[in-house]
Image: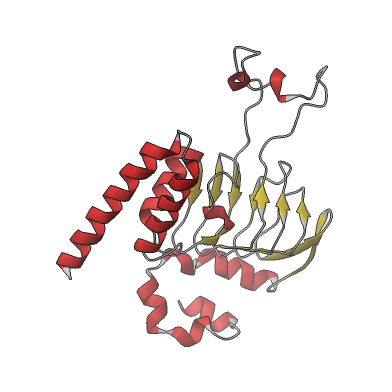
Amino acid sequence: MLEVELKTHRASSLIVFLYRLLKGGKRRSVAKICYSLLCRLEGGQYRSATTRKLLQQDYGVEIGAHSYGDAFLPGLFAPSVIVGKYVSVGKGVRVVTQNHPIDHLSTHPYFYEKALGVIDRDILVPATTVIGNDVWIGHNALILPGCNRIGHGAIVGAGSVVTKPVPDYAIAAGNPAKVIRYRFPPDMIEALLKNPWWEKPLDSSRKHPDRMTRPITMDEITRT
């Protein structure tokens, strides 16, 4: 077992070296292949620690344990996005943390991004968008700067345009997205937030799989 782990670590280190070497040059497509291989080598998006580290270092996106989806594709989520644990992100989901300035003479990036060489400092600072734990975001949802938080246990419907924060355990959908209903009554939501199952080791859920695979009751929440 130890020998397998050592081989995996060496292979990961080599792939990271190649990724770093190719990322900034003309062979970015090869760098993306290296990134994909690295993810598979370490058990996929659910488990890969190194790809999480690369996303945080190179793209400013922080992804918690066991989360998966398009959040893992480099560059698709804006910098300063924080994704919690056990988050399910559908295909085509995008998170935008910065608008164009509408009260300036021009809305063009020339006049607010230093990297484009026209101005000597960045004018706009991206906001932080926090996606809580155990969130499900449906295909092609768009999270705009007006939404700085999607609460724990929330669901965002496919194709939704989210312009405001989404409360804990709310189901929001539409354009603009509105809260349709909540997954549980207020007292159950309060109890769930006081007993966050996602903070416990995964092995504790494996010991009682029946609790995770059927409707939960108030007694079960308060018993944990």
Question: Please, is residue 114 above or below residue 223 in the view?
Answer: above
The residue lying toward the viewer, choosing from 158 and 16, is 16
What quarter of the picture does the C terminus occupy? bottom left
- At 83% from the left and 22% from the top, the residue drawn is 103
Q: Could you tell whether 84 is left or right of 17 in the image?
A: right
Q: Residue furthest left?
A: 3
Q: Where is residue 162 in the image (x, y as percent from the top left)?
A: 75, 52
- At 48% from the left and 41% from the top, the residue drawn is 28
- At 45% from the left and 52% from the top, the residue drawn is 33
Q: Residue furthest front?
A: 26
What quarter of the picture does the N terminus occupy? bottom left
- At 62% from the left and 28% from the top, the residue drawn is 125
Q: How many labels does the image show?
A: 0
Q: Could you tell whether 57 is left or right of 77 in the image?
A: left
Q: Where is residue 48 in the image (x, y as percent from the top left)?
A: 39, 59
The image quadrant of residue 97 is top right
The image quadrant of residue 181 is bottom right
Q: Where is residue 34 in the image (x, y as percent from the top left)?
A: 40, 51
Report the coloring of the rendering: secondary structure
Q: Where is residue 145 in the image (x, y as percent from the top left)?
A: 71, 41
The residue lying toward the viewer, choosing from 100 and 191, is 100
Q: Could you tell whether 114 is left or right of 20 in the image?
A: right
